[in-house]
Image (cartoon, helix red, strand yellow):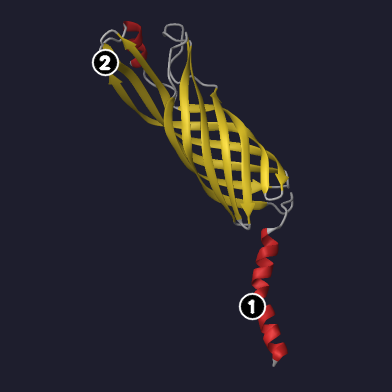
Amino acid sequence: MLYKKVILCLLLCLPSLLWGQRSERTPTLTHPTLYVGASAGASASQLLFMPSVSQTLLQGIRVGFMATLANSEYTDFTFEVAYNQRGWQESRAQGTDKERFYLRKMNFIDFPILCHLYYPIRRAKVGIKMGPQIGLFLGETITSKGTSFTPQERVRQSLKVVNTFAWGLMGGPSISYSWGRHRIEMDILVYYGFNDIFSTTIRDPYSKSSELFGMLKLNYLFRLL
């Protein structure tokens, strides 16, 4: 009777043992692992004008869904679809118009594809992420206060977005911690845009209007395979 109970106990524990072994599997080229999850964070952005424009960093939110394919103990690749708020902000105290400011917040859907190179330290991983990102402009909101804007500032503030397709490079440090099938990551990334948001022909007031922003985000991932 006792041996029947032992066999029954082993049978009940077998799925948990197999699950635990599966969760500890090291990814390879022939047997990669797949994670899916979500990310949330904040960005700080500005526009790189030429001639330069005095700005303060514009803060925005960034949320997305992501999938990560790990093909070795030291590398993986991440594809993400994210909503991001970015743009630029101007403010200045001049005369009695102390609260004068101009804020232009642009909304994008971004598609980064990042290579993750890391070194594992037990359950933690420390490394860098880098790769291209493309984005689609969705729309914008403009907030303006004050009346003492110069003619040049008013011209700049009236510029229309002409290039709705954004592209550039993104990269930065990343740390993560894994347990079982779960992983939490923290990324600090910087994006440099190669395209101009506004028209930059010889007849336009600016010869450059590209994007630059940094972000801090947290990712939660669950391993499917």
- Number of numbered discs present? 2
Element at badge 2? loop
Q: Tell me where residue 136 appears, x and y as whole percent.
A: 45, 32
Residue drawn at x 52%, y 35% is 216
| Tag 2 residue | 146
Q: Quadrant of the C terminus?
A: bottom right
Q: Tell me where residue 77 appears, x and y as whole percent.
A: 64, 42
Q: Quadrant of the N terminus?
A: bottom right
Residue drawn at x 46%, y 37% is 62
The residues tagged by marks 1 and 2 sit, at their Cα atoms, a distance apart of 72 Å
Question: What mark, if any, has residue 12 been given in the picture?
Answer: 1
Residue drawn at x 69%, y 79% is 10
Q: Tell me where residue 208 appears, x and y as whole percent.
A: 49, 13
From the viewer's perspective, is residue 150 above or below residue 172? above
Q: Is residue 4 visible?
A: yes
Image quadrant of residue 163?
top left
Q: Tell me where residue 79 appears, x and y as whole percent.
A: 57, 42
Q: Is residue 85 visible?
A: no
Horizontal side of 206 relative to 19 (left or right) equals left
From the viewer's perspective, is residue 130 above or below residue 46? below
Q: Earlier in the sequence, mark 1 or mark 2?
A: 1
Label 2 Cα neighbours within 10 Å, binned few <14 / some 14-19 / many ≥20: some
Foreground pick, 26 / 165: 26
Identity of the amino acid at label 2? Gly
